[in-house]
Every structure is written in structure tokens, then in C-alpha cells.
Image: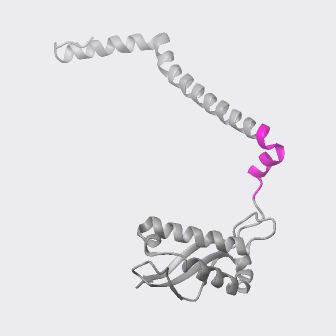
Amino acid sequence: MITRLGMAGTTAARDEVLDRLRGSGRILVIALPVVRLLAGIAALVAVAAAGLGGYWLAAGPQAVQRLWTPSAETAPADAVVDMPELVVNLRRDTPSRFLKIGLSLSVAGRDRPRLEQAMPQLTDSLQEFLRNLDQDDLEGSAGLHRLRSEIKRRFNLILSDPAGRRDVVTDVLLRSLLTQ
């Protein structure tokens, strides 16, 4: 035990603690942390195995095999296509009468020819949509988010393949937006 006797008391206490650890106590000091570490690793392996087993039951063995096989097909980089700037009339009951907008569309590289071919239909659809807006529809960040989302939805309806499994337009970027 450590007492206030000075150096002699401290060394005596230290010798007493070391004497206790020389026998079976030393083994416990080393073995217990190692056993706890191994138990933690075993628990982690059990949780990972249970998760993988659940995924295997839900998705099937082919899906589990795809987890470890590298994907041969890499997605091509997105291309950005600029649409011509448009000036449209807003609804009559709005204080701002005109809207000037410039858009860029982000599409997969393989879909760029299809987008450029359908540009007249996209422009027509965009003009029709924008002419039905008023100033309140463009207010704040929520209004701009709704504007982008609706344009993206409309363009993907025009450009989608018959199965409609994926979006052609991945993002709508506003280059300019001016109301007057």
C-alpha cells in the first residue's frame, strides 16, 4: 500500500504489488484484455455474418456474388448541354411580366444525341410550362428547387425510353434567371 512514509513506503508498496503479480495475477493482467479483445472481434464477425446471411436470403446468391466481383461497366461521365436562353411572358396577374431563363442540362454521355435530337420538343414544353408560372412560384430557394424539379420531371417524360427505368436528365442547372 502506498503511504505517506516517503520513499521507503513507496518502494515497499511497489514491491508488494509486484509480488502479487508474479504468480497467477500476472497471467490475469495479460490474459483478460486479450480475451476481451478476441470476444469483441468474434462479436463483430458474428454481426457481419448475420448481415451477409440476411442479404443472401433477401437478394439471393447472385446478388451476394456481385458484391465481390468488380463491375466491368463504368458509367460514362455526365455531359452538360446548354439550352438556348428563353424570354417568356408570365401570367397576366403577376407584377413581373417577363422571365428570362438560361438552362443547362446534365445528361449521361450516351444520352447526349437523344437530347440534342429532342431539343425542339424540350424547348416547346419548357415555354408552355414557364408561361403558366407567376412571380410567387419563383420566390425563394424552395421555389427554385420546385422549378428545377418540375423541369427535370417534364424533360424525363419526353426523353424516357418505353420502359422508363432511368432518368435521362440527371440535373437541371440554372445559368441565368431574371424576372422583369
Residue nearer the viewer, 28 or 96: 96
* Image quadrant in which the N terminus is located: top left
* Above/below status of 111 relative to 20: below
Residue 139: give x, y in percent of width and height.
42, 70
Residue 161: give x, y in percent of width and height.
78, 70
Left or right placement of residue 56 versus residue 174 in this view = right
Task: Give the residue drawn at x 65%, y 32%.
Answer: 47
What colouring style does the render use? one colour
* Above/below status of 12 relative to 58: above
Please give the range of residues in magenta: 56-70
Q: Main secondary structure of the magenta part?
A: helix
Figure label count: 0
* Above/below status of 21 relative to 137: above
Task: Give the residue drawn at x 44%, y 78%.
Answer: 93
Quadrant of the image occupied by residue 84: bottom right
Residue 34: give x, y in percent of width and height.
54, 25
Residue 127: give x, y in percent of width and height.
59, 83
Q: Going by the picture, which residue comes out furthest to the left?
A: 5
